[in-house]
Amino acid sequence: MGYVIGIDIGGTNFRIGTVDTSGNLKNFERTSSEMLQSDSAVDNLGQEVKSYIKRHALENQVSAISVGVPSIVSKDKSFVYSTPNLKGLENIDLGNLLSAYVNIPVFVDRDVNYLLVNDIKTHQLDPEQEKTILGFYLGTGFGNAVYINGRLHVGKNGAAGELGHIPMYGIKEACTCGNIGCSETRCSGRYLRHLTDTCFPETDISEVFVKHGDDPVIQEYVDTLAIPMATEISILDPDYVIMAGGVMTMEGFPMERLIKAVKDRARKPFPSENLEFVFPKHNQDSGVIGGAYAAFDKLSKQKHS
Ligand SMILES: [Zn+2]
């Protein structure tokens, strides 16, 4: 097998790299994802990929392209649904269109699924491919990926693992997804920014845990995060729970408090008393490498079927 070109598309950044079967990365580049905020997003992306291949002399060496998006993706890994942060890629058959443009197989998936694949590989959590692992990724939103008995759980429509969009009792605010009262309206970096701006206007958000970690407002924020997490943990009784994302890696984030709050709310005695948490540090390239791992996995399964 040759290389996989891994692409990780966020609301702000576009990241691309060349990955071999061992997960080694080269030619990593990061640019703005602004070219995708347009009606000709797929053409722009296709041109970008073509010029990347030419620039790094990769012609005839690329087995597949993986694309991670902050969205829900169809079960066949091609169609991208609702994407609030990237309008140009909303409701579009991205995988098939891009594949036709560059004449290389393309796999598209939720960016958090690729992060989870990368975390599992990097930390060697499931060499036997039999474990159940949950990924909680708290950034601007609340990302979640679910891996059951050795494989990503995608669901009937590819829409599984949207823990940020489960309804929470008593909340009336509208969510970015269009529903009312989703957990993400409380459990997100977006809400932390709102709390900081309204309760601690003199504090920069980067210092809010260091300066106000003992304030009841912040304590309640952290305890609320535990509600959806403990819910999914009690449903699936995972082997590992991955805690990551920009908010959880902020200076002073009270991880001990969050873990205690999760254990307090999870079913006793198990899974509560036998939880194993993993705390990966992500880099700019984590989603690119994770996507490549997932693409190599798909390619080898296609070969054997
Ligand atoms: Zn929602």
Image: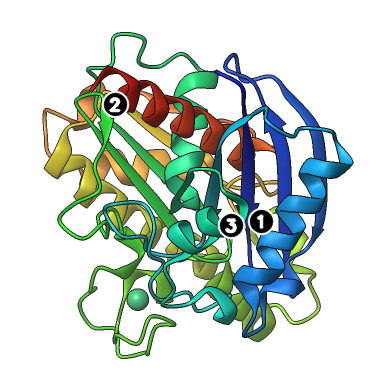
Give the label on residue 214, or none: 3
Give the label on residue 275, or none: 2
Cα distance, mark 2 to mark 1? Answer: 25 Å
User: Which residue occupies 83% across, 43% down?
Assistant: 54
Q: Quadrant of the C terminus?
A: top left
User: Which residue occupies 11% across, 28% down?
Assistant: 269
Q: Quadrant of the N terminus?
A: top right
* Kind of residue at disc 3: Asp
Residue 284 is at least partly visible in this image: no
Cα distance, mark 3 to mark 1? Answer: 8 Å
Q: x and y percent of residue 99 in the render?
A: 52, 53
Location of residue 150 with respect to 104 vertically, above or below? above
Q: Is residue 128 left or right of residue 67?
A: left
Residue 49 is at least partly visible in this image: yes
Most distant residue in the right direction: 55
Between discs 2 and 1, the one toward the N terminus: 1
Q: Quadrant of ligand 1?
A: bottom left
* Kind of residue at disc 1: Phe
Q: x and y percent of residue 240 in the render?
A: 33, 26
Q: Which secondary structure, mark 3?
A: loop
The residue labelled by disc 1 is 209
Q: Looking at this view, is 146 or 142 the one in front? A: 146
